[in-house]
Image (cartoon, rainbow, N blue to C red):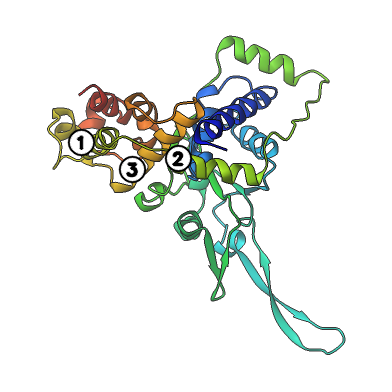
Amino acid sequence: MDKIESLKAVHTHYESIRKEISRIIIGQEAVLESLLIAFFSNGHAQLVGVPGLAKTMMIQSLADVMDLRFRRIQFTPDLMPSDITGTEIIEEDMQTGRRSFRFIQGPLFGNIILADEINRTPPKTQAALLEAMQERQITAAGNTYKLEAPFFVLATQNPIEQEGTYPLPEAQLDRFMFQLPVDYPSAEEEKEIVVRTTSAQTIQLQKVIGRETLLEIQQIVKALPVAEHIVDFGVNLVRATRPEDSNIKAVHDYVRWGAGPRASQYLIIAAKTRAALHGKVTPDEEDIKAVSTQVLRHRILRNFKAEADGVSVDDLIGELIRA
């Protein structure tokens, strides 16, 4: 299959997934597209939104249509690292009487991991995700276990109730490719949600692609060429978030800490993926701009003046793009 045919296949798969998901998820098209960009880029995503916005259903539905193993972890204050990575138990052979250790896999051994309310568990357990997210492996009882590809972590967080929560450290936030706000549906969408969910109709989602096809898409996206001036545009955008490297007044006034090099990497691969999903043979500046907010939102640390003046991170990113 040549490059053009491969890109057509990626676009066709993308449209098929969107069409199938829309049978059960009303609205949230932008969130769904961003999640698929993260999947096809082999990245992780964080969803921020109040309860009841179908975050879990959307992720479960994506696992269903892509025929992937779905695991849901409800993060709580008493959750231990071994509860998510797995633990060793002693087994006794009934014939010989000999005892041996056997590793019982935890819920991280899946393809799509939903870390529900990740900020409700202590840092020790949050840190257990770091190795899995970055290295695609876990270490338990001195042994290292590889995680099957593809492996995605999708974390949810409630932005309203902060009592008894543990904010994610910057090192862990940086492992997430995207941070995606999930907003309320429109009036028409909410009406359709109510009508559909209060009827006797049951919707069974169809498998659209499989694991092997998803891995192929990831390789197609990675092989997509990028013009040097597009790479420069992305890198300069990220560097402009750092007060010491920026010549933008808003950054000097309101930013305490800018985005690191991982943001540049994610910006380019996300732009490549978005271009492929829309049938383009190479990304352009519009693709960079379209994914910049999702990539940079959780990597820019505002100072006290920004909070006092009511300047949000999204406002700063908009200023960066305009400049």
Vertical placement of 310 versus 234: above or below? above
**Tag of residue 263:** 3
What quarter of the picture does the C terminus occupy? top left
Give the amino acid type for the residue marked by disc 1 in the picture. Ala
Find residue 118 and report its horizontal and vertical position in percent.
Answer: 51, 47
Find residue 89 and report its horizontal and vertical position in percent.
Answer: 69, 74
Would you call the spot at circle 3 few (<14 residues within 10 Å), some (14-19), or many (20 or more)?
Answer: many
Residue that carries the numbered disc 2 in the rendered image = 162
Can residue 50 be seen here? no
- 274 vs 314, nearest the viewer: 274
Q: Name which quarter of the figure residue 98 lies in.
A: bottom right
Residue at x-position 15% and y-position 36%: 246
Q: Residue furthest right?
A: 95
Vertical placement of 51 versus 194: above or below? below
Residue that carries the numbered disc 1 in the rendered image = 240
Q: CA distance from mark 3 to mark 1?
A: 12 Å
Residue at x-position 54% and y-position 53%: 77
Find residue 83 and report its horizontal and vertical position in percent.
Answer: 61, 61
Residue at x-position 35% and y-position 49%: 170
SS at badge 2: loop
- Disc with the residue nearer the chain's start (2 vs 1): 2
Give the amino acid type for the residue marked by disc 3 in the picture. Ala
Q: Name which quarter of the figure residue 96 lies in.
A: bottom right
SS at badge 3: helix
